[in-house]
Image (cartoon, rainbow, N blue to C red):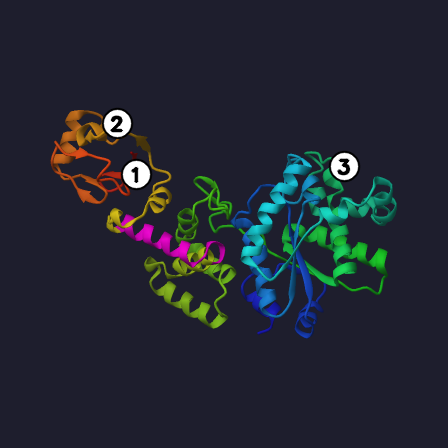
Amino acid sequence: MNLIQELKWRDLIFDVTDPEIEQFLENNKVTFYVGADPTADSLHVGHLISYLVSKRLQDRGHHPILVIGGGTGLIGDPSGRNSERQLLTLEKSLENAAAITKQVKNILPEAEVVNNYDWISKYDVISFLRDIGKNFNIGYMMGKDSVKSRLEQGISFTEFSYQIIQSLDFMTLYRDNNCKMQIGGQDQWGNITAGLELIRKTLGSEEKAYGFTWPLLTKADGSKFGKSAGGAVWLDKNRTSVYEFFQYWINTPDKDAVSFLKKFTFKSVEETKAIIEEFEKAPHQRLAQHKIAEELTVLVHGREAYESAVRISKALFSGDIKSLNVNEIKDGFKDVPSIAITEDKNIVDLLIEAGLASSKRESREFVKNNAVSINGDKVKDIDFVVTKEDAIENQFTVLKRGKKKYALVRH
């Protein structure tokens, strides 16, 4: 199947600006762009789809330009929002742009990355209004969904003008980089079509450009994609550890697994169908989730980091805590209660201090009943002393009470 047919099979086409786009992509090697505004110093998994779709086009011989919105990030995109964004300072916008540039280059190392601040900043107010703003009809702009949805709550002139500035991106890249197509989520439809209109009005009615969008990602239960109990799932391992990133995909609900497998992995259509068939026969084995988690963790963080995340998972399941190194302990037990001690401690007292027992009597009972383990080993002696020398790399001791109650001791 051709590119558009495959994207449709993967549920990655919501709308196209021109039905000719299918043959256009088959018969040409096309330069296209996708953008992201640097609203934070890291992308999150909600952004991933933009770069995965870009990679699919690149794998078919097309050339991606990844636009980091150092300029548009100063304005704020009203698309998909019901309130005004917090305005960034120029310094923060450019700082965030530099951080996420590293992330997108990690996913698409051969792609061209540009910052739209480089051309937007060259316009003064008069030139912008005369050369660009005059091409936009207020009625046309008011008709965009991103604007209409905000009229009741209120929209500032700043965010109202966002579509003009993003249109300037498309026109500039079309003119200077032979960029013939923009892609994005369905909430970007108004911005994409505004860009096509600006190209036609400024560069000539004979100029031809294209765009397509994919559906906004949602979960089957209606909850927001890209969120976990701890908030957004970031691509920056310092915000979301590799293990947490890996676990996010492992915990994909069965109802979403097939959809995510099609959208987020690069396995061929035939291989994907085979995985789906096997998964549906034995969903409890979570084959689809493991395939998704492996591919995305390797893509974003590398093979070594993925293997470390797998080791943590296996160690937590088997209880073989001593097989983990210090960094893996930090990742695997990031969210469990922790305490610091400066001297050796009796196990009975330590269970109380760590919040795993409420009294010495209860603590002794847990130990005597074989319910307590240290670094994966059962402790049955109420006189047992936890020492720094026995800690993992002399830094951490993992306490476990029962099947699921953990505490991390830092020496």
Please tell me which residue lies in front, 142 or 230: 230
N-term mark: 3 or 1: 3
For disc 3, the marked residue is 157
- How far across and how far down the image is residue 154, in percent? 71, 34
N-term mark: 3 or 2: 3
The amino acid type, in three-letter code, at marker 3 is Phe
Asked whether residue 300 is in view, the answer is: yes
- Other-residue count near label 3 (Cα within 10 Å), few / some / many at <14 / 14–19 / ≥20: few
The image quarter containing residue 55 is bottom right
Q: Secondary structure at mark 3?
A: helix
For disc 2, the marked residue is 353
Q: Residue placed at 32% from the left, 33% from the top?
A: 338
| Side (left or right) of 64 relative to 177 | left
- How far across and how far down the image is residue 122, in percent? 79, 45
Locate the N terminus by quadrant.
bottom right
Q: Which residues are magenta?
A: 299-317
Which of discs 1 and 2 lies nearer the camera? The answer is 1
